[in-house]
Image: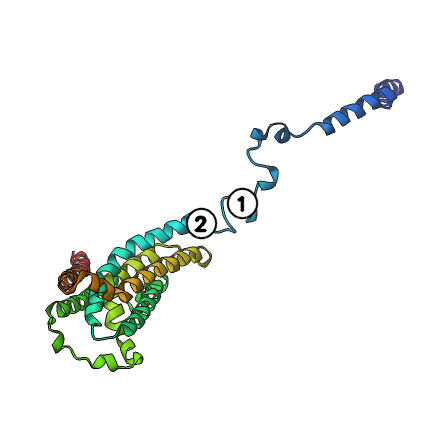
Amino acid sequence: MELLESDSARPRQARYQAALRPDKLSLDSSLHRNFASTPPPAALDPTLSGFPVTLIRCPARGRTSPHRDGGVDVAEVTKSIFLIVSALFPIVNPIGGGPVFLALTREYTRESRKLLARRVSMNSFILLVASFAIGTHVLAFFGISLPVVQVGGGLIVISTGWTILRQSDDEEERPAVRQRVHNTDILRNAFYPLTLPITVGPGSIATAVTLGANEPRHLGVNLFPILAAVIGSAIIAVSIYLCYGFADRLAAVIGATGMNVILRLSSFLLVCIGVQIFWNGASALLKSSMHLVN
């Protein structure tokens, strides 16, 4: 038994002694130096890694990718801005609303009209952002649906357009008292009816509420759509101020007859828009009532 153990121990001892030879140590050291001096594959061929090692980010640790600027996806925010502007600008229609604004403020001076246009643009900006951000919550709190808002707002738009369509063209019949009224009295009409429903009507509010309802409800994710809504609403507000504040210069270029034609067409379109908004809400209510009956 002892002989077998000594025979089995000899190969191990021989291997240990062979590992401690100087030539073996020099061979192992040279191999180690050659391996340590060999550059990594990414340094030999940059195509093996695709990106430098320092630019690689781990999404699991919350680090930003090289395609984002400070964590903000610029492409998504830009896309949301274009979506908001393209959806709201045809409905707000500040170009077509300029003659209507001029017809309702014809008795005011140019400075008063610009002041009123600035206030209307500010009110429109606040109303659009509020409709986008908290419109669904406000309607849910009062138990009001979008079709009901469309029906009520459509009736107001029809009434406003019909009033402008039937007004007289005789300038002598217009009182000149408002030219001497203080600016605070002029701004009383800035919100109603100039901002709501002429500029930002139920159609614009319904569109803004719909766009806001389609966004995620988490605060961290929803900050970027709100930022896009603020920028898009600011663009709409600037266009409103330019079209309303300089409507008198447009009227001077076109002339009295051309401005009268544009005013009548705009008023008629305003009535048609009101009827369409009213019908959209009424048809939605009728469809819901038919489903309840069935």
Does residue 19 appear to the left or right of 138 in the view shown?
A: right
Residue nearer the viewer, 53 or 122: 122
Image location of residue 31, percent across then percent down:
76, 23
Position of 212 compared to 20: left or right?
left
Residue 203 — which label? none
Q: Quadrant of the N terminus?
A: top right
Task: Decide which of tag 1 and tag 2 comes sooner along the chain.
Answer: 1
Residue for point 83% across, 21% down: 24
Q: Quadrant of residue 266?
A: bottom left
Distance, label 1 to label 2, CA atoms, is 18 Å
Q: Secondary structure at mark 1?
A: helix
Is residue 93 something that shows in the picture?
A: no
Q: Nearer the viewer, residue 3 or 165?
A: 165
Q: Amino acid at mark 2?
A: Val
Is residue 90 depicted above or below 105 in this figure?
above
On the image, the x and y values in percent for residue 118 come to 32, 69
Element type where label 2 sits in the image: helix
Query: Which residue sits at x=17%, y=69%?
Result: 160
x%, y% of residue 167?
12, 71
Residue at the image point whose x is 55% and y is 48% from the top: 63
Q: Which residue is mark 1?
A: 59
Q: Quadrant of the C terminus?
A: bottom left
- Residue on which the image places disc 2: 74
Image side of residue 199 versus residue 33, left or right: left
| Front position among marks 1 and 2 | 2
